Image: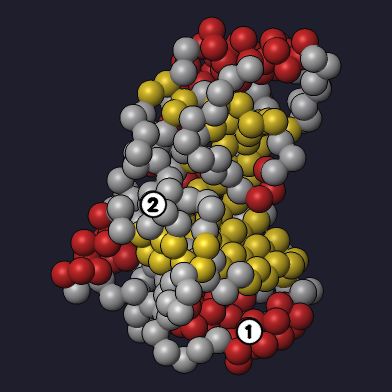
């Protein structure tokens, strides 16, 4: 059995998928806020090891209908290698309905339309894109390696090829005082691009990422949990298209999810309730060490894990 290295990172929609690692870590790994892969040395797993895992699962009677390729940014693999892996999956599991993975805007834009079509024909369906923010200056500061114009183009091309766009975003990513501004920009982008799913991993602070130094020197002032909730409320209120939405918060253990626009009023009501109960003082979601295994510190308005 293949041993998984690092911490499992995938969208909640993939929780029942067969997760097939094809790499360790993230080939980009420069987002200023991210600690998921900092401790890992990036490397591609040998094709023989990947095939052994496929053979093992088939040998014990496995017949996955949905497969998620890991780890971070699996779509950035070189064309020939990714095609080999997809063909291998189809050979072992021809009954598989879809093969999904994380991607970046740039990993889509560097492909030709014919190459994108080839991936779609081999079963690639959902690509999860780290959109994060609707503001170009925030994307540049966080070193996301794309701007909004490029994100629009990437979404247009992947959907034209027959693949499905799912968006990862982060309330709080624009910093203190800019939550509503970011919500309005994100709402415009999401209404225009119409992702199937939006997953909001509300930002938490971590001392082991580059962004922490920006917090120490004052070049980034984080938003409080209350402001993050208010930003999320503003965003949901402005979303008009049919979108499945799932929003997570760490410190307050709050999750709001539903199908827009029909569940909008119910979702806004839940947010109003938790906003009314959230302290007005500067309370943040903060961790140290590796996650998960989060525990609330006694008497301190933060999260930590040692």
Farthest residue toward the right? 61
| Label 2 neighbour load within 10 Å: few <14, some 14-19, many 20+ | some
* Residue 131 on image: x %, y %: 46, 56
Q: Is residue 246 left or right of residue 29?
A: right
Q: Residue at coordinates 25% horizontally, 69% vertically from top-left?
A: 215
* Residue 143 on image: x %, y %: 29, 53
Q: Is residue 109 visible?
A: no
Q: Residue at coordinates 62% horizontally, 10% vertically from top-left?
A: 52
* Residue 180 on image: x %, y %: 45, 82
Q: Residue at coordinates 74% horizontally, 83% vertically from top-left?
A: 265
Of 299 and 160, the residue lying toward us: 299
Q: Is residue 52 visible?
A: yes
Of 181 and 115, the residue lying toward us: 181
Farthest residue toward the left? 217
Of label 1 and label 2, which has the lower sequence position? 1
Camera-near label (1 vs 2) is 2
Q: Residue at coordinates 65% horizontally, 63% vertically from top-left?
A: 246
| Label 1 neighbour load within 10 Å: few <14, some 14-19, many 20+ | some
């Amino acid at each position: 059995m293949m041993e998984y290295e690092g911490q499992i990172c995938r969208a909640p929609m993939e929780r029942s998928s067969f997760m097939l690692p094809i790499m360790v870590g993230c080939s980009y790994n420069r987002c200023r806020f991210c600690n998921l892969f900092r401790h890992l040395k990036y490397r591609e797993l040998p094709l023989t090891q990947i095939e052994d895992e496929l053979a093992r699962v088939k040998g014990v009677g496995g017949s996955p209908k949905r497969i998620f390729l890991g780890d971070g940014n699996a779509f950035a693999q070189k064309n020939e290698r990714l095609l080999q892996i997809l063909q291998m999956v189809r050979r072992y599991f021809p009954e598989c309905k879809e093969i999904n993975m994380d991607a970046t805007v740039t990993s889509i834009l560097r492909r030709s339309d014919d190459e994108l079509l080839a991936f779609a024909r081999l079963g690639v369906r959902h690509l999860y894109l780290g959109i994060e923010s609707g503001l170009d200056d925030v994307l540049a500061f966080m070193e996301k390696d794309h701007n909004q114009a490029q994100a629009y183009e990437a979404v247009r091309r992947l959907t034209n090829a027959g693949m499905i766009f799912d968006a990862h975003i982060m309330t709080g990513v624009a910093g203190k005082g800019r939550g509503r501004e970011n919500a309005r920009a994100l709402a415009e982008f999401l209404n225009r691009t119409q992702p199937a799913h939006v997953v909001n991993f509300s930002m938490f602070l971590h001392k082991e990422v580059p962004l922490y130094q920006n917090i120490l020197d004052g070049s980034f002032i984080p938003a409080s949990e209350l402001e993050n909730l208010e930003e999320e409320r503003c965003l949901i209120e402005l979303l008009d298209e049919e979108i499945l939405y799932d929003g997570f918060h760490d410190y307050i253990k709050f999750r709001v999810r539903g199908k827009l626009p029909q569940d909008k009023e119910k979702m806004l009501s839940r947010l109003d309730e938790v906003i009314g109960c959230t302290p007005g003082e500067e309370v943040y979601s903060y961790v140290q060490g590796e996650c998960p295994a989060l525990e609330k510190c006694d008497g301190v308005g933060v999260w930590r894990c040692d």
